[in-house]
């Protein structure tokens, strides 16, 4: 995991501000997708448990 973080940082430094912006945007997108997936999973589990 640390290796991936270093790669992202290295790429960001190599590309400059545009690269950093894209990386943060990508990370935010992934975070949002994970949050939505988690909420959807909780919803499904809730429906399954409480019928």
Image: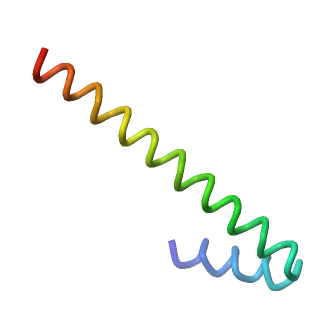
Q: On the image, which quarter does residue 15 sit in?
A: bottom right
| Count of numbered marks | 0
In this rendering, position of residue 15 left or right of residue 36: right
15 vs 46: above or below: below
Q: Position of residue 33 (x, y in %)?
A: 53, 45
In this rendering, position of residue 30 left or right of residue 10: left
Residue drawn at the location 83% of the way across and 73% of the way down? 19
In this rendering, position of residue 21 left or right of residue 7: right
Q: Position of residue 38 (x, y in %)?
A: 37, 42
Residue drawn at the location 68% of the way across and 68% of the way down? 24
Front-most of 1 and 19? 19
Q: Position of residue 45 (x, y in %)?
A: 22, 28
Q: Residue furthest left?
A: 50
Q: On the image, which quarter does residue 26 sit in?
A: bottom right
Residue drawn at the location 53% of the way across and 78% of the way down? 2
30 vs 21: above or below: above
Image quarter in which the C terminus is found: top left
Q: On the image, which quarter does residue 20 sit in?
A: bottom right
50 vs 36: above or below: above
Residue drawn at the location 78% of the way across and 65% of the way down? 22
């Amino acid at each position: 995991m640390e290796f991936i973080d270093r790669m992202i940082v290295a790429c960001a430094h190599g590309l400059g501000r545009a690269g950093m912006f894209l990386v943060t945007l990508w990370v935010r997108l992934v975070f949002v997708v994970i949050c939505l997936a988690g909420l959807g999973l909780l919803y499904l589990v809730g429906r399954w448990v409480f019928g």
